[in-house]
Amino acid sequence: MANDLTQHEPSRPLTPPASAHGPGQTNGNGAAATVRRAPVQSPAPAPGTSPQPGTRPRKKGGPGFLVWLLVLLLLAAAGWAFYHFYFQAQAQPAASGQTAGSAGSGGAAGGHHHGGAGDKIRVVPADATKGDIDVFLTGIGSVTPYNTVTLQARVSGQLMEVDYKDGQSVKTGDKLVQIDDRPFKAQLEQFQAQKLHDQALLDNANTDLKRYQVLFQQNSIQQQTLATQESLVKQDEGTVAGDQAQIDQTQLNIDYCNIQSPIDGVVGLKLVDVGNQVFANSSDLVIVNQIQPIYVDFTINEKDVPSLMEKVTAGTKLSVDAYDGSNVTKLATGQLLTPDNQINTSTLSLKLRALFDNKDGALFPNQAIYGHLLLDTHKDVVIIPVAAIQYGTQGTFVFTIDDDDPKNATVTMTPVKVGTIDGDRAEITSGVSEGDEVVVDGVDKLANGTKVIVSHNNGDSSGAGGSAGSSTNAPASSAPAN
């Protein structure tokens, strides 16, 4: 009966039956009466329904959650093992190589230091010499043809012949282009016939004039008749002269049909083909450039104009060298022709024009060049390589070598004043004397008083140990002109 109540009425608590003895009373055997309550169980919710309020849902998981946790732990352990045994195994040989390399370097350094040069810097010297150096005014420019002629059609007509090849050298009078001249020849014949007609009228008028003059002397005709005949003769003369002018004009048009080169030069690329119609004063037929001789135009800074004009005014012939666009290769040598008559205010430069014979054709129209105008030559001056000159906040300086004791050679920072620079040679006006040794390579780590190993171009070295652990290649430098 109690079980049935538990299943069908879960919300009703089981009330123990009233004891005849009352609370705290004992039964007939003298024992206290105890009432046991059956546990209350909630019925399982129907599928698709939520649990009732006040009830606790059953926890999910169980063995499945533990399985996934175990899998994740195994993957983490595998990743750690892969990293530890693979990457660490690769890092060890590299570290071993570096260690070996460091040991080798240390051994080499130790050996170098053992030679007494561990704290020294290897440098390459050059001697300061005396000689002549040229003073150039240099500027960028271009090549300009001596003459440029653009030939146009002076009459209209069909182009019948092109008698030149692209880039051909031509002489004055060479035939280049032929325009159809047949219409002008027909017109010429017409004007010549008209002239014959008018010339006949003139001849007849002159005959009558002579007759009238005789009759007038005989008082056979009036003076007015004679004057009228004289006027008629002049009219006929004018008509004949007009006919001749038309003949000359037509002949000139025929000559215009045969286009010839007016200068010696080189023709450009063909501009029009045979068969095309050309028109007077509007069709370019060919361009001819005279390139022997040829001009080179270049500019100099306005600050150099006074020294240049001093030479020009004195009548000095100034030489000009033309270098290629990279300012490395010398192409030709010419003479300064003239400076321009004004300074360009936008660039603060003056244009110069030089003349070159260009017999070898090294210069070509519109070619970019550098002009080097030889303004002067400084005689018997101290010259060092440009590579030895250093620039700093304290000014211009060089490192001179003090090698009185070859095993303890040092460098001294020596301030210098630089004069003219010509290519890789520089004139020194003060600071260095003839015979001084200056550093041209290895200056990056030098300071005043740094100990050095002097390495000459011939491979000889002076310094501690007599020989260096490694060789140094010195850059080639041109010898100063003596």
Image (tube, grey):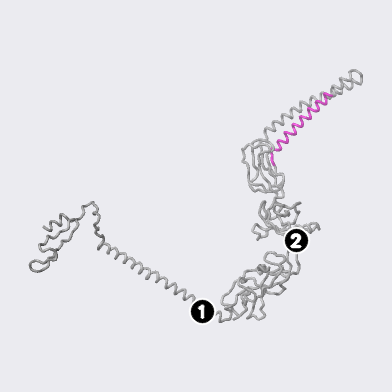
Residue 107: mark in rendering: 1
- Label 2 crowd (10 A; few <14 / some 14-19 / many >=20): some
Quarter containing the C terminus: bottom right
Quarter containing the N terminus: bottom left
Judging depth in this view, the residue of 228 and 92 nearest the camera is 92
The single residue placed furthest to the left in the displayed view is 28
Q: Could you tell whether 180 is left or right of 106 in the image?
A: right
Position above or below: 296 against 280: below
Q: Nearer the viewer, mark 2 or mark 1?
A: 1
Give the quadrant of residue 380: bottom right
Which of disc 1 and disc 2 is earlier in sequence? 1
Place of residue 139 in the rendered image (x, y in percent of width and height, measured from the top left)? 69, 57
Q: Is residue 235 magenta?
A: yes
Position above or below: 427 against 245: below
Q: Could you tell whether 377 is left or right of 457 in the image?
A: right
Position above or below: 174 against 183: below
What range is drawn magenta here? 231-259
Q: Could you tell whether 215 is left or right of 362 in the image?
A: right
Residue found at x 21% / y 52%: 47
Q: Give the amino acid type for the residue marked by disc 2 in the picture.
A: Leu
Place of residue 291 in the rendered image (x, y in percent of width and height, measured from the top left)? 70, 51
Q: Is residue 140 magenta?
A: no
Q: Give the amino acid type for the residue marked by disc 1 in the picture.
A: Gly
Q: Could you tell whether 125 is left or right of 48 in the image?
A: right
The residue tagged 2 is 375
Place of residue 427 in the rendered image (x, y in percent of width and height, measured from the top left)? 71, 67
Place of residue 360 in the rendered image (x, y in percent of width and height, measured from the top left)? 69, 55
